Structure formats: structure tokens, C-alpha cells
Image (spheres, rainbow, N blue to C red):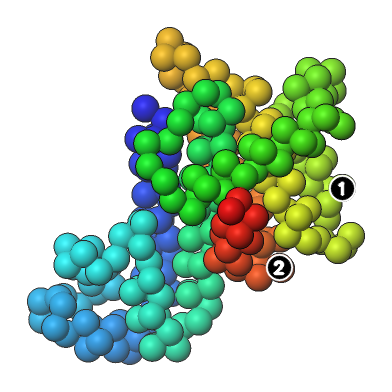
Amino acid sequence: MTAIFMTETLQLIYRALLVQIARNLDKEQQKELQFLCARLVPRRVKKALTLFLSLEDAAKMSWANVTFLKELLRNVGREDLVVKLTEFEMKRDLSILLSFYVKKRNGLDSFYQSSATNAAEYLVQLMKGFQRRVDVREMLRSSGKNPKDLWLRFVDECSPSQCMTWGKLSLLVAVGGEIIAVSSSFSEERPEEQEEAMKMCIALADELCYPILQLGTWVCFKVFHTARSK
């Protein structure tokens, strides 16, 4: 249930981004894209959105892989749109990482291994050490704040102006996952709470994109945690 909801939501965000990208391409750039994809899509394809659909049918792009589309946009001089796709990749992968964290903390193991699941495993261990000093569950209960507001307080305390580091960012991700985990239920009888938890994973991932861009890239974040978890 949660995996389906997460996938459908991220797919919707992806398709909305494709609409935005199509609207920002002028006629000449659309012709250039058509030329670049001449061997992949039918000649009758003229408009950007139709081109994107054809590329999806050819398995050259999807919500889970926008690498080819980024390369196309670089070739027509639209680095600004490449940045938007990079931000989507970060939000997508962070949302998935947070959802893995929440599942792990609620006793649900992931059915496959990936860089995101490995990073989530590391962050769970990081959070266990952090809880020896700060009880997030008690803080959430006694503060009277809603979960997102409590997490934003941690963001303020680790703001970029105070020299953000990968370590601080890791803690923000872990605290975010912990707050979602303790404020949600994964009972089969309460699917609406599962959906709310996944919505919060996506919302917090969106907040984390900016500090990650300041530090480097999502790839750097995954490499950092893959090395730490070994």
C-alpha cells in the first residue's frame, strides 16, 4: 500500500515537471530534440510532450530514470531545465530513503537492497546513538508541535549559515525519518495514516533538496553513507 502510494505520488510530480519543461522549450529547441531522437521516435512526433511519451515507450526515460532526458536538454542548451530534473532526482531518492527508514523503524524490512536502503540502515543506527541524548518521541509528545514543525526546528538549528556538513545533514534526515516513524501507524487497519506518513516523507525530502545542493549532489550523499555503512 505505502509503496504504491509513494510511486504514484512521485510519478505525478515527475509528469507535472515534464509539463513544465515542455512549456519552457521554444519551437527551435523542440525541433532540435526531435532531430536528436530521430532514430528513437516516429517522424510525426513534433511536440515536446508527445516526444517524451515516445521516449518512455522506447524505455529511454521514466520517473525512475531521467538521465537520458537530462543529456538531451544539455545538448539543446537548457542547463536550467537539467537543474530542475536534478532537484527532482534528489526529492525522489530522499523520499524513498525516508520511506525505507520509516518502514525499518516500524519493523518492516525492505524486500530488496539498494543504495537508499543501505543509507537508511546506517541512519537507523545513527538515530539509535542520537536517542541516548535526545528522546525524539518524548520531544514530539511534550512540545505540542505537529511533526513537520518539530522537524523544521531541527533544520533551523542546523541551518546553512551555521556551516552545514554531511554529518549534520545526515542527522536531519535521520531525525526527519524518526519523527515520521513515531507519529504514524503502519497498521493495516489504518491505511490513511500510512499515506500521511508517505506524504510527509515527500514534504521533508523537498525541504532537504536545498542543503544537499549547497553541499554537492545526491550522489555525494549516497557515496558518503555507502562508505560509512561498510
Residue at label 1? 157
Q: Are marks 1 and 2 in contact (CB under 8 Å)?
A: no
Neighbour class for label 1 at 10 Å: few (<14), some, many (≥20)?
few
**Left or right: where does residue 137 sit relative to residue 206?**
right
At a point 64% along the width and 37% down the height, the residue shown is 124
Q: Percent x, y for residue 222?
A: 57, 59
Residue at label 2? 215
> Which residue extends farthest front?
230
Image quadrant in which you'd find residue 159: bottom right
At a point 78% along the width and 53% down the height, the residue shown is 168
Q: Can residue 158 be seen in this view?
A: yes
**N-term-proximal mark, 1 vs 2:** 1
Which amino acid is tagged 1?
Answer: Glu
> Which residue extends farthest top?
189
Neighbour class for label 2 at 10 Å: few (<14), some, many (≥20)?
some
**Left or right: where does residue 51 sit relative to residue 4?**
left
Q: Percent x, y for residue 195?
A: 47, 28
At a point 33% along the width and 74% down the height, the residue shown is 68
**Left or right: where does residue 42 sit relative to residue 136?**
left
